[in-house]
Amino acid sequence: MPRSESVCYSSEEKLAFCKGLGADVCINYKTEDFVARVKEETGGKGVDVILDCMGAPYFQRNLDSLNIDGRLFIIGTQGGAKTELDIRSLFAKRLTVQAAGLRTRTLENKAEIVSEVEKNVWPAIMAGKVKPVIYKSFPLSQAAEAHQLMESSNHIGKIMLVP
C-alpha cells in the first residue's frame, strides 16, 4: 500500500487547507468517529504512526487507530495528562508508545537537537521542500492577543511572536 498522509482537524476549512498541502485523507474529529474512519480508509488495518499533542482524551482511541506494530508519539498533553490503560491493548498489536518533550532535557541535549535540525531539516527548508505555514505574527508586546487567537482555534498554521 502506498504511503498515505492523513490528518484530523476540526473544521472543513482546515481540512481543505490540509488537502491542498497534500494530505490524502482528512478527518473532521468533531463530526466523525476518527477510529472508524481510519479503519475504513486502511481496510481495517489502522495507521502506522500517530503524532499526538492532546494526550489523555485521545489515548485509547489513538491506540485503537494503530496498525500492528504501530507507533504512538505523544508530544503534548493539551487535553490532559492522566488516563487509564489496559496494557493488553499494547500486547495485542505490539504497539509502541513514546513521549518526547523538550522541557526536561538538558541544555546540552537541546543543543544537540538544534544541531541535528540545522544539519538534517534546515537544508530542506532553505530549498523550499519544507514550508512552515505561518498564519500571523504578533509583536511580543501583543502576546495576550496571540494567545486569544490560538485559543479561539480560528487559525490555520502557526502563530508567531516576534521581537
Image (cartoon, grey):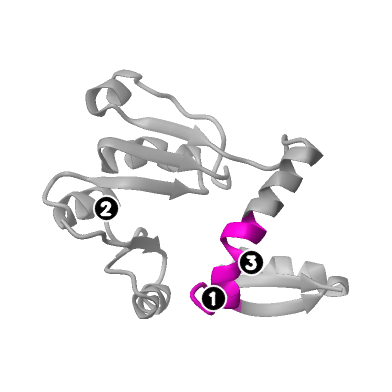
Q: Is residue 132 magenta?
A: yes
- Rendering coords of residue 45 (x, y %): 16, 44
State the residue at coordinates (29%, 19%). Answer: 88
Outermost left residue: 43
95 or 114: nearer the eye?
114
Gap between marks 1 and 2, in whole Å? 30 Å
Q: Is residue 149 magenta?
A: no
Foreground label between 1 and 2: 1
Gap between marks 3 and 2, in whole Å? 25 Å
The answer to which of marks 1 and 3 sits earlier in the sequence is: 1
- Which disc, if any, is residue 150? 3
Mark 1–mark 2 CB contact (< 8 Å): no
Q: Secondary structure at mark 2?
A: loop
User: Dot 3, crowdedness within 10 Å: few (<14), some or many (≥20)?
Assistant: some
**Three-letter amino acid code at the position of disc 1:** Lys
38 or 99: nearer the eye?
99
State which region is magenta: 117-134
Residue 94 lies, with reference to residue 75, above or below; the image says above
State the residue at coordinates (80%, 40%). Answer: 107
Quarter containing the N terminus: bottom left
Say which residue label 1 marks. 131
- Rendering coords of residue 141 (x, y %): 88, 73
The answer to which of marks 3 and 2 sits earlier in the sequence is: 2
Mark 1–mark 3 CB contact (< 8 Å): no
Say which residue label 2 marks. 33
Residue 21 lies, with reference to residue 40, above or below; the image says below
